[in-house]
Amino acid sequence: MKISVIIPVYNAEKYVTQAVESALQFPEVSEVILIEDRSPDNALEVCRKLAVIYDRVKLYQHPDRGNHGAGPSRNLGIEKATGDFIAFLDADDYYLPNRFNAEREVFKDPAIEGLYGALGVNYYSEKAKNDYYRVFGDRLTTVYQKYHPEDVFPGQLGMRGSFGLIHLDTLTIRKNALHKLDSFFKKTLRLHQDTEFLFRLSFCTNLYPGILDQAIAMRGVHENNRITKVDTKKINPATTRVLLWREVNEWAKSQDAIPGDIKLHITRMTRSFEIAVAPFFKKWFMILKYLITDYPSIRSGLYNINFRRDLF
């Protein structure tokens, strides 16, 4: 198998070398594709050096050399990839030696289109651990049990109770399976574009569990992670997630094959976040409206995603 590992690079000069070298340890990795996204730090120069040192490292920028975000950067990486399989890695994360152990066996079955595993946590400093341990702890980010592929889509949407999450760092997908999607990563989302992508991917392809009980890659947590600013409410999570769910809702409406109960769940999740970000008086009007017409739209937010503290 030939795996193309795609790494979007932004403001990651301290970490990208570790990410690249963690991917190069595997003979199956035929190329590591760096998409440098006009970083304000010295990341471009670090990437240039890596491309000189390692012949499997390929460096690209957007045609206008501008900053476009992680989603469009991954899209460019997919376009440039020559491998039969695609894997993703954030520039401040890294793979562990067991990263592709399951893939070597599972992908012998041509019917299996994608595989996911478990992500661990590494704190790059004591300050990062003190600031963000309450967010990530030492927990694995993973799907908690070995589910059949047909359960993965509703499970990721929150319809299967305590299901768990797929992280992009642990996904390996056949490149030809990606063409089942109407598009890759959405340019309209600066955050959570990976979550939206995984929602659609789990609906359109057969995703199977790999190693779920131990980490196959590590999330690098430091003071400048964009996602930690969301998870610790330096950026309002309801604001970013309402954009995510609106995008998912519009897509779901266009898919005749999605069952009605799943579409209704998506609509209710969207309404829940819209209530969370609404101005004070509009919020109460919306709550009253849905208490009368569609109480589960309130309940979805209050119980499924526990954003009660964002409401008031």
Image: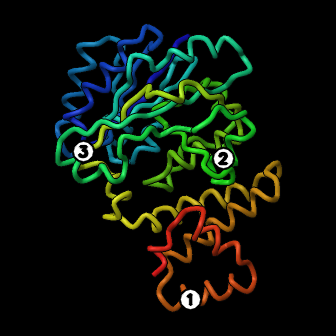
Q: Secondary structure at mark 2?
A: helix
| Residue to which mark 3 is pinned | 222
| Precedes in sequence: disc 3 or disc 2 | 2
| Precedes in sequence: disc 1 or disc 3 | 3
Q: Are marks 1 and 3 in contact (CB under 8 Å)?
A: no
| Residue to which mark 2 is pinned | 155
Q: Amino acid at mark 1?
A: Trp
x 49%, y 32%: residue: 118
x 47%, y 67%: residue: 238
| Residue to which mark 1 is pinned | 284
Q: From the top left corner, tell me how far across and down residue 289 is, in percent.
A: 68, 86
| Precedes in sequence: disc 2 or disc 1 | 2
Q: Check the image and report above or below for 126 versus 217.
A: below
x 47%, y 10%: residue: 28
Side of 228 where 200 appears, left or right:
right
Q: Secondary structure at mark 3?
A: loop
Q: From the top left corner, tell me how far across and down residue 112 is, in percent.
A: 69, 22
Q: Residues within 10 Å of mark 2 (few under 14, many from 20)?
A: many
Q: Are marks 2 and 1 in contact (CB under 8 Å)?
A: no
